[in-house]
Image: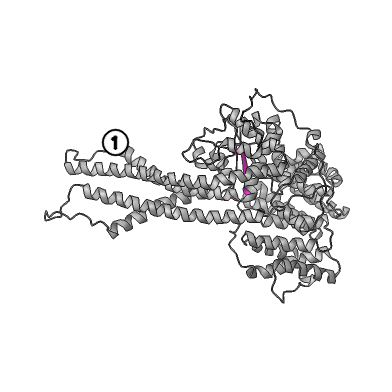
Amino acid sequence: MDFFAHQEQARRHTGLLVIYFTLGLIGLIVAIYVTAFLLFQVAPASSDETGKAIAKLPFFDWELFAGVAAATSAVVGAGSLYKSAQLAQGGEAVALMMGGRPVNVDTRDPDERKLLNVVEEMAIASGVPVPPVYLMDNEEGINAFAAGNRPTNAVIGVTRGTIRNLSRDELQGVMAHEFSHILNGDMRINTRLTGLIYGILVVSMIGYYILRSGMFVRTSNSDDRKGQGAQMAFQLFGLALFIIGYIGVFFGQLIRAAVSRQREYLADASAVQFTRNPEGIGGALKKIGALAEGSHVSEPHAPEISHMFFSTAVPQLFATHPPLADRIRRVDPNWDGKFPKIKESAPAEPETKKQKSKANPFPLPLGQEVVMGKVGTAQPQNIATAAVILAGLTENVNQAAHEPFSAQGLIYALLLHEDPAVRERQLSYLQRELSPTIYHATETLVDSVQQMPRESRLPTMEIALASLRQLSREQYIHFRDNVYNLVQADKRITLFEYVIQLFVIRCLDEQFGIRKPKPATITDPAKLEPEMVEVLSLLSYLGEENDAEAKLAFAEGGKAYGLSDGRSIMKRSECSLSSFGQALERLAEGVPPLKRKVMSACVAVIVHDHEVTLYEYELTRAIGSVLDSPLPPLSVGEVKGS
């Protein structure tokens, strides 16, 4: 199953969760109604003003049922909306709820540095923005999770026991597993599931508080039999809510386990595929079995997100993860069933360039199928390329990418124009607008950036992106304005400048609340044909100087998308990057199968002449970023020129 099929399956699972939630809500309403009806039946008879006894309720009373249905729906809905709104902020909300602290991108702790290097390597290799990393310092078990609604707001959470006990290869296997969840759309399912089950849990919480309040509350006429009966009925109702709520949670856990277990097997297999090293994730799983703490997480909120973890975090009736032994045997069929003894681990050795560049990337021929096969995955050659890119960074560039203020200077340096006159105007502008510290950082990076291999610039920007997330909103807005002004310094925008805007500004706009992504709901390709014509036209002209060849490239793209007869390429003068960006945002509203068509059409255009330039591929990566369809950077040997 490929990336888009995984995404579509995840979208359908999300729809199934809504159906299950609705069925569960109906079950709750019926159970609470029956409870209320029985309590009315056993309650002491009441009388009206004339002293005549009021008749008992019939078996089905519409008014009572409507009241129960409205109240239950309101409580469960409010609880689910509250938790879903909390989690909609992105993975950071989950990480903080779990007691995680953000790992400083410029940390000098060897274990933390090892973790960040592995995460950066996996992010570059898979083409997703480098996610912030949170460390749960008080957790000695081996565990981790990926949380968020989309790749742009994902975070990685890791326990202290994970970085203390795992080797680099084992840690890479665990991170490959978590990045598989990011790429396959599992994070969104997990987030929705957490919100829905929390809404059902609220019913039980209300019952618990009714029970507690009943222990201390007494009626004003406690000797009155009716008053005592009403109080007892109230407490019985609270007990019933408590039990009914947990029955709902019971079925919620059953659903969660059914959805989660198979996706854990898939993520394990993907980790082996990504790293081509079954001993990595296999060794991590074996150490979980050998460690006294195992994968246990003691944080009180752990049961809420138990399905998000790498391994079983808390014991539950319905396990959210397959048995440990089964997972190990799937990645290591020759396992003898014995867990290795874990020695008291020494601090990790500092990462060295030799360690990071030990793998040699190998070239692949570029064609439409090959490029499409790269979408949403990380292959061993991509991981090796990422290691080489990281190893090739000069010391000052590497340090700048891992510090929020210097990272701004790094982006500014990447945007400086090759024309000395334009570059001088840009530097004069920056000197006026920046603090002396950031301006000095920009100046010192200019030479290093100019000497950097062209294919390393975009991945370096992606590393800096993680540091820029640590800016305040005010600092980011100032940085954002400076980027726009640098780009407009020569009154025109280059393709590389546009790509940086798409990657950096679009991603950070979402984090800082400036832009809210629209949900992917469009299923009809015809509705997006005008935008598709806009995108394919510009891509065709960028790849072909000859208008006749551009028309042929456009025809290839139109065929791949399935454009209607009569749709033709726009005039070169009518194409602009601004309208191109607006068209992309509209295309991002398509469902995964439709996004596959969009990406396939774009790739068909750039491979039309059988030579993909670095500029063309980077723009295609930027398109994939907008469509939440990440592409990894080209491997060494694949670059055909720029």
- Compared to 620, does 454 lie above or below? above
Q: Residue at x 29, y 36 (%)?
A: 215
Q: Residue furthest right?
A: 420
Q: Residue at x 71, y 30 (%)?
A: 110
Q: Is residue 554 left or right of residue 136?
A: right
Q: Residue at x 30, y 45 (%)?
A: 237
Q: Could one spot residue 97 in this view of the protein?
A: yes
- Stretch of the chain drawn in magenta: 144-158
Q: Label 1: how many residues lie within 10 Å, few (<14), some (14-19) or many (20+)?
A: few
- Compared to 518, does 201 lie above or below? above
* Total tally of numbered discs in the picture: 1
x%, y% of residue 153?
62, 48
- Compared to 84, does 298 lie above or below? above
Q: Is residue 179 left or right of residue 548?
A: left
Disc 1 target residue: 216
Amino acid at the residue labelled 1: Phe
x%, y% of residue 620?
75, 57
- Of 248 and 299, the residue lying toward us: 248
x%, y% of residue 351?
75, 32
Is 152 in the magenta? yes
x%, y% of residue 117?
72, 37
Location of residue 261 (image quadrant): top right
- Of 505 and 229, the residue lying toward us: 229
Is 265 in the magenta? no
Q: Could one spot residue 115 in this view of the protein?
A: no
Location of residue 99 (image quadrant): top right
- Of 442 and 436, the residue lying toward us: 442
